[in-house]
Image (cartoon, rainbow, N blue to C red):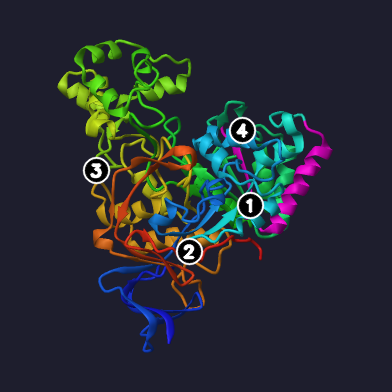
Amino acid sequence: MHDLVIRNGRVVDGTGAAARIADVAIDDGVITAVGEVADAGTREIDATGHIVTPGWVDVHTHYDGQVSWDPVMAPSSQHGVTSVVMGNCGVGFAPVRPNAHEFLIELMEGVEDIPGSALVEGISWDWESFPEYLDALEAMPRTIDVGAQIPHAAVRAYVLGERAHEYDVTPDEIAQMVEITRQGLDAGAFGFSTSRTFLHTSKHGHVPGTYSTPDEVIALGEAVRDSGHALFQYVSDDQGQGGDEPWLDTLNEMGCPTTYTLAQTPADPTAFRTALAAAVSATAAGSPMTPQVAVRPTGMLYGLQSSFHPFIAHPSYRAIRDLPLGERAAKLRDPEFRAALLDEDPFTKDRFAKYMATNWSQMYRLGDPPDYEPPIEASAGAIAEREGRHPGEVVLDWLVEDDGEAFMFSPLGNYHEHNHDVIREMLDHEVTIPGASDGGAHCGLICDASFPTYLLTHWARDRSRGPKLPLERVVQLQTSKTADAYGLKDRGRVEVGKLADINIIDFENLHLHAPKMVHDLPAGGRRLLQDVDGYRYTIKSGQVTFEDGEPTGARPGGVLRSGR
């Protein structure tokens, strides 16, 4: 008998091949047959009317702290993800000296909006070096597999101490950083990550590594290249086009594989096409360059419970911000209070924050089910113009819905034409993969760990404002494409010999709910979660880990080691 047989499902195997009705047999955590399976299984699942896909592989997450205390790894695991890669954007928790725990927490809190109190209480710190970090994580069985990258900021803090933000470093200090990176790569790191964007700051300023000299970055890139199994991951304002990042051309010339976050920006809405062309050229020349693109607009969720909304810096709101949620909502309904609020300027010197607080044409009611592709006519600015109102009044109406628990959506990138056509163009490009879900991060402002689910619901089934993508292509993007990019050749396909990581999905009834704020992190820390219906079963290494959205208690996941 087989350990498990999945019967009569519509298999979408992750290769892009046409879906077909087939059985799938699993033994010892591996797929042993796909087609007509005559022998019975110790357990059998009837997948009639459902699709059977590989488990999702999400390569851009920030579970670096949560992974040390949480075996379930929500919210990604709740959305069919069976493998993640963390340690992105240059921030993480290894290597670390015993006196630098607080510093790395402050960086992660500032860059990725993860509550510092939760990290302080939750992280075990059973390590100092990066290899010790991986060893410590192996002690906890979990629902999914986790892989890690070496974060530039942590390496700089380990070598330079209080000088972590300085860029006048010696050749010996660069050599120390390189040696730490080589040790981490030898231990199984999937890459080295760095941040080169003005957007990533903490209370100490820009993240260490943001302005590192080409000598430093190139030396670290050489270590990645020499490993033969890793990627150089970065987020940059230049988005893979060189420009102010001269080290990038050098990495390409020396054959260092790179991956970075690519988005359409309002300042230069066609630049992404130049970046895609550059990635094609570099890859063809033997230096793989893989842009990671978001599956919906890069944006923020504004609400009375989130980290930001258009009135958060107004003096009148600051006076009531500590009231219970229901009382704040009631106050914002008061006509006299509203009038005073709308007559004020935001109390901030941050020009970007002022822009976000008054960019009315880029603010929408999210709703339930959430709409991430609203027309410009649905924006606060457009509604206010039609109704002869201040746009702030429209926003206040949205903020107080559901007694203040509702959220608005403000798309900042990938939404220049107020539709998803550019996202479709990037997703369907030969060199790109889905990325930037940021699972585990941005707990008070962004809720994008649901990206894999949105790929299915929006792009393969529901989209009405433009062309969709074939179901087979959508599944391929989040499985074999992401797995192959990071060298995970044993998964991402429903094929004989591959790891039995599988989702069984009621595709027609797959439903993504509106985000909600919960306080379930250590120390009562908050985070945004997004419930989903329709994942009938998630199977990791042949074991059912989720059944109808509920964890079964099975813990077949572990730590992935690249190059081993």
Whole-percent x, y for residue 150 in the image: 65, 48
Q: Which residue is mark 4?
A: 207
Report the residue marked by disc 3. 368
Q: Which amino acid type is marked by label 4? A: Val
Kindly give the residue lying farthest to the bottom in the view shown.
Answer: 38
Q: CA distance from mark 2 to mark 1?
A: 19 Å
The crowding category of the residue bearing disc 2, from other C-alpha atoms within 10 Å (few below 14, some 14 to 19, many at least 20), is many
Tell me the element at label 4: loop
Spatial distance from mark 3 to mark 4, Cα to Cα?
Answer: 36 Å
The residue indicated by pointer 1 is: 191
The segment highlighted magenta reads 169-197
- Expressed as whole percent of the image width and height from the top left, the position of residue 278 reads 55, 47
Mark in the foreground, 2 or 1: 1
Residue type highlighted by circle 1 = Gly
**Mark 3 against mark 2, which lies toward the viewer?**
3
Callout 2, which amino acid? Answer: Ser
